[in-house]
Amino acid sequence: MSLSRWIVLILVLSLIGAFIYFDLGAYLTLENIKTEQERLSNLLAQYPWQFSLSFFAMYVAVTALSIPGAAAMTLVAGAIFGFWWGLLLVSFASSIGATLAMVLARWLFKAQVEQKFRRQLETINRGIEKEGAFYLFTLRLVPIFPFFAINLAMALTKMRVLVFYLVSQLGMLAGTVVYVNAGTQLGQLASLSGILSPELLGSFVLLGVFPLMAKWFVDWIKAQRVYSSYKKPSSFDRDMVVIGAGSGGLVAALIAATVKAKVTLIEKNKMGGDCLNTGCVPSKALLRSARHAYDNRRGEQLGFTDQELAVDFKNIMARVQRAIAEIEPHDSVERYEGLGVDVEEGYGEIVSPWHVKVNGKTLSTRNIVIASGAEPFVPPVKGIDQIEYLTSDNLWQLDERPERLVVLGGGPIGTELTQAFSRLGSNVTQVELLPNIIPREDQEFSAMVQTQLELEGVNVLTGHRAEEVIVDGGENKLKVVDGNGNEKMVPFDRLLVAVGRRANTSGFGLEELGIELNANGTVAVDDYLRTNYPNIYAIGDAAGPYQFTHTASHMAWYASVNALFGMFRKFKVDYRVIPWATFCSPEVARVGLNEMEAKEQGIDYDVATYDVGDLDRAIADEEAHGRVKVLTEKGKDKVIGVTIAAEHAGDLISEYVLAMKHGIGLNKILGTIHIYPTMAEMNKFVASEWRKDNKPEWALDIAEKFHTWRRGA
């Protein structure tokens, strides 16, 4: 920061300090206003212009310096100047002061903040460029937001000063009217009995309900903008139409039917969506078979003579399909129709905010829930279209095990399938662009998994980019390039693409309606899961930010309740405690922050770890490997994040999910009895490690002296 900026900052802080030190805020209380009202009124009568200009200048200074007292001064204006003259003075003084505060904060801090938070500000500025004026107007209109905070926040954006002033002038007018009017009634208060006057009570009621009225007005304006091209039906066939019968859509439809709403669920492919048919269920069934093959190969560790199992891959894939078939009735058309859901198996298309076409008919509905899921993303690798590559969608039709398999992607899907096929006998090469596999986790956990994969014979190529698929004389090869530009050819029989998933948001009317999308292609929703059309909601993989089956179900509750009962009360979706797991060996499960994220966010934290290799049950099970890592608030036992790498980590993490959800600290986990011998004891032991690191040394010193005294030593 330059010298001139330091000088101005010190001057501003000195003025604010003087205001606090000399308790000048005492002059801006209602009690003082009543005491001095007569004298101030006399000054106004004697020196109308001088007094008015002095008040105007003081108001500008208070708001420009973000000093508390603007609300009280607004009431003063009404009490002393009357409604119209007070409104004129305050309206212009508040806007000018706010603009000066914004300009001053921008001059002082913008460069430093941009340097530290450039990435976050880029996202904010894109929104400001698009609808900044309307966004500022809504913030000004609803006075529950502190004006000084808005001034400082907007200083860090690229909003033009003139736009800021004009929008502030207009947006603050309604709130100023309410406060000045309340001030005129306070000015007429002659005694305590006057508090009960209808006029004064009415002014305070208006102050209370104005934010709600303003919020309703803002929502109404937004609705008029998006609905202007469509005619709303006078009556509806349905209360809700849900597009997509994956986990999110099924739960949304079931909730609606349970509360006796008329709901239609539309699915163009298979009931149960990706999780049942191509995702969670088949992959876990495959992993179980692969685990059996692996355990058999290491039988000597358990006291058996090694006997290699003959892998019948075709039979294994048949077992995968059998698992799907056994679970399928849970998500079937018959079951949901029996629960009161109208199910349409066909292609649904949104043709207006209240109409959905399906199977040759058009349904009118009060609300629409988009639960269209996601599909595998295929990167633009040169030459990839020459081959019939695999994804998590078509993988399950394989009936012959690939001898040489290349897996593109080191995330959860790629890592799970890499290990499964390796254990079933394929020669697997895993290619990951980033330096680590499962890159969302701390490096130590990524390293554990990579080490295990390599011990099992997987060729893991991290930091390598898939450059080109080459087909030469019937031989398939993948050219990969490392960070230094070195090329390598990897021969393969089949290529599995598992680099992530992208939301299904095209082809069923979203583009035609102009439903807004995020930069990553997911549907943009607010805290209530509403799109830019307030009666159209989006959940699950289609909306993100988490592409998990359990978060889709979680979101479905909020979307359904808000859609059906939002006129009474709306609920903001809660993403505070979201767990997930990668089901490789060792399993890696997490909830909350890891160290990498805590450092990026500048959060001060403590770390407690426990080596699963010391756990009795893990030793007995020949699974003595892994780690529990708990992050807590600095100096406290409040859990802010946990990562577990161990067998059954996805189950073991649940204790911490409960703890974080309900504010249970490590001291209470330590004081909870855990069955011996179980893997769950690791949660108690890591809490014990935290206790050792945070033991009160002063209290232990006192205890030592006490025991010495008791012994008479």
Image (cartoon, rainbow, N blue to C red):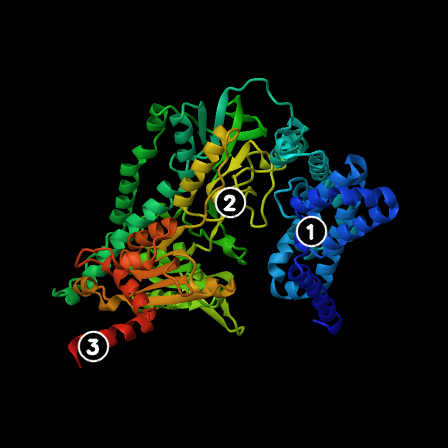
| Residue beneath disc 2 | 503
Mark 3: few, some, or many residues within 10 Å (few <14, many ≥20)?
Answer: few
Vertical placement of residue 387 versus 21, above or below: above
Report how far apart the C-alphas of labels 3 and 1 lie in the structure. 60 Å
- Say which of marks 3 and 2 sits in front: 3
* Amino acid marked by disc 2: Ala
Q: CA distance from mark 1 to mark 2?
A: 58 Å
Q: Earlier in the sequence, mark 3 or mark 2?
A: 2
Q: Which residue is mark 3?
A: 709
Please, what secondary structure does the residue beneath circle 3 have? helix
Please name which of the two marks, 1 or 2, marks the residue nearer to the observer. 1
Identify the image quadrant of residue 204.
Answer: top right
Question: Do labels 3 and 2 touch, CB within 8 Å?
Answer: no
Q: Which mark is residue 477?
A: none
Q: Residue furthest bottom?
A: 713
Instruction: Assign a secondary structure to mark 2.
Output: strand
Q: Is residue 163 visible?
A: no
Q: Quadrant of residue 624?
A: bottom left
Amino acid tagged 3: Trp
The first of marks 3 and 1 along the sequence is 1
